[in-house]
Every structure is written in C-alpha cells, then in structure tokens.
Amino acid sequence: MAAADAGKTFRIEEPMHGAVVHRRLGRAVSKGLEIEVAGIAPPGAQVLVQGRPATRDGEKFRGTAELKERETEIVATLQGEPAQQAAVRVVWDRKSCRRYRFSIDDNSFFLRDIVQRRYRSLFDCFYLAMLRDLHEEYGVKFTVNIYYTTGDGFDISQFPDRYKGQWRDCSDWLKLAFHAHANKPDYPYQDAPPEKLLADLDQVAEQIHRFAGAKSYALPTVIHFGMTRQEALKPLYDRGVRALSGYFRKSGSRYDVNYRFDDVVSEYLSRHDAWKDFQSGIVFSRVDIVCNSTPNDRIAATLEPLSKDPNQAEIMDLFTHEQYFWPFYENYIPDHAQRLATAIHWVTDHGYRPVFFHEGFLGASV
C-alpha cells in the first residue's frame, strides 16, 4: 500500500485529541493513569503505541498509554518505509472528584429590584434570599452571570456600592460574572469582532469590582447564547478565562450553543463532560441540565443516566436562567425555586461537591 493511502487509514480514534481523562476512564498506576488507546491502521501492519507493540484485529489496533503529566502527547507509529506517526494530546484531570457547578444566566432583574426598592440588605430581595437559603441547606455555590443593562433605562453603573461588605461576606459561595451587555439581541457575539466582546466584558467587570469587590468577581464561564467567533477564544484566554460552558446539542440539522466548533467536537462534547481546545487553551464543559426547561419530576430522571456513564458522571454542570423566577415575566415558572432545590439535593445526595469552574481545573485542585 502506498504511503499516501496508508495515511488515510491510520489514525488514533480514542482518546480524541483534547480529551479530558480522569480516574473513571483509566487505571491508577504508580504516579499516573493508564488509559486505553485505539485506532485504525492498514491490516497486518505493525503499530506501536508509545513505543510498545499494539494488538491488531483487522483494521483496528489497541494499546495503552501512561499519563504522568497534566498533558500528554500520545503517539502511534505505523512501522514501514518510511514509518508514519499519528498523535493526539490529552489532559489528565489528576485531582478529579465528583463535583458540580451551578450557574445562573441572564441576570439583571434582581440588581434593578435592589436599586428600585433601596433594600437595607441584599437579602431583602427574594431572589438572593432564595440563593442564600439553598446555600445554607446544601452548601451550594452559585455563579451569577449578569448583564450590563436591562434595556429599559437601568444599568449596573446605577447600582450602589453600599452593599460591598455583604457581597464580600458571601463571596465564598456567590460570585458575579460577565454574561453580555444586554439580553437582546440574541446571539450578540456569534459574529461580533472579538473587540466588542472584550469591551463588554471589561465594562461589566469594572462595575462588579466597583460595587461588589474583587472577591465577588468571577471570570466568565458562559457567554450569552454560547456562541462566539473562534478568534475571540484566545483573547478570552489571555484575559484569564479557562473554562466555558455550552449545550453542544443539535438544533435541527446543526449544533448550537457550541462556540461555533465543528460537528466532530460538538458531537464529542454532547456525550462527554469536557474537552480542551489547545488552540485557545480553554476547556469546554457541557451543561447537563437546564432547570427552567426541566419539569421538577424529570430532574432526577435527567441526571441519573449521566451519573452512570463514566464519560459524563464526574462533573455535573447545572444551569438555569434568572428571568423565570420573576412573576412579572411572561414565562414565569412558579416552581422554579423547587426545581433548583431538587437538582441540588440530587447531586448532594449522590456525593457531588459544589465548586466554581474558574478555580483550579474545572473546580478540582491542580
């Protein structure tokens, strides 16, 4: 077989380039993790994986690789004249544990409510009181992703700094992060130049630091509608962003809320907890449940199968949207708070601990 033809049929298929692997996906060895490596090669040809002979079954080959570092390049070599190589790079989540993150998108109403009603305490606002009560019962941590403006004359430059002490006192479980300039238009950063996204991020970050302080600020982990131009990702990384979440689900014939990654990456993330984009340096996480879209009696049934799949069981990315808590909103959900409690109770009862994704590696120690 000609070298060009062999190249078309020689590749590593598992793990995928950018895969995030952990204790559930391998075997512990001395100071490392051993994982399976599989791919295809011309039948009968000898293949080495990390320098060791692979087993062959028709076009398939299998071997193992030992991970000792945070990132490892796995190399398969097809013996011949000349020899050919196929390689993938993987990330070892070495301090991995069962953990969950709770993120709330589209926040602006509660900030406007506090300004309009001039509450003595942040927690006189029912929304923040609800989050506090859930924290006190379950230990949950919330990342609250905010807009700069509600679009009706209120913006967060109007929010006073007199609550700064309260924000600081609850900063161990409540963080504020950038989401977008405003709720509309939809998909605001899908085609926008990176400079627009960065300017909006800086505008919101400046205000969070002013009225809540540095301890309450979190780097963004969800961009509004989960869509950006690919060239915006490296500038986000340079600003400190290390993780972004999306849906990575098909909408009609195409994937959506996927940061404009191709179908291969999106399909992979649709059935895995995380994947690293080495070009930007950012790790992407798939949202496991959207509480405002999931009836209370379906929450356990949604999470249970994920907890039994090693590819999806290690991290639970829980998610909802602020507007559904407010009775004046046209799509108000009366039992929205109960849905949160049900989801949080479920993950707590199944041994998941609360984390912030911007701390460590997706919330795990590094």
Image (tube, rainbow, N blue to C red):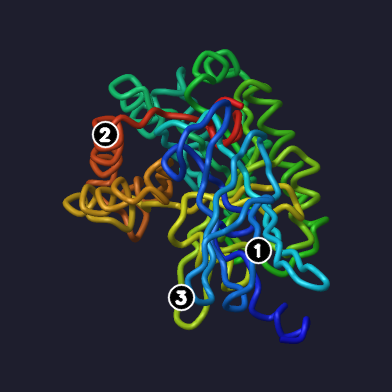
Q: Which residue is disc 2 drawn over? A: 350
Measuring from the top left, give residue 57's x and y in whole percent.
Answer: 47, 71
**Residue at numbered disc 3:** 251
Q: Amino acid at mark 3?
A: Ser
Quarter of the rendering occupied by the N terminus: bottom right
Label 1–label 2 contact, CB within 8 A? no
Q: Going by the image, does 135 lie left or right of 160?
A: left
Task: Report the amino acid beneath label 2.
Answer: His
Q: Is residue 140 above or below residue 91?
A: above
- 44 shown above or below 36: below
Q: CA distance from mark 3 to mark 1?
A: 18 Å
Residue 220: give x, y in percent of width and height.
63, 42
Q: Secondary structure at mark 3?
A: strand
Task: Mark 1 or mark 2: name the one nearer the start of the chain.
Answer: 1
Q: Would residue 49 appear left or right of 99 to someone viewing this image? A: right
Q: Which residue is mark 1?
A: 188
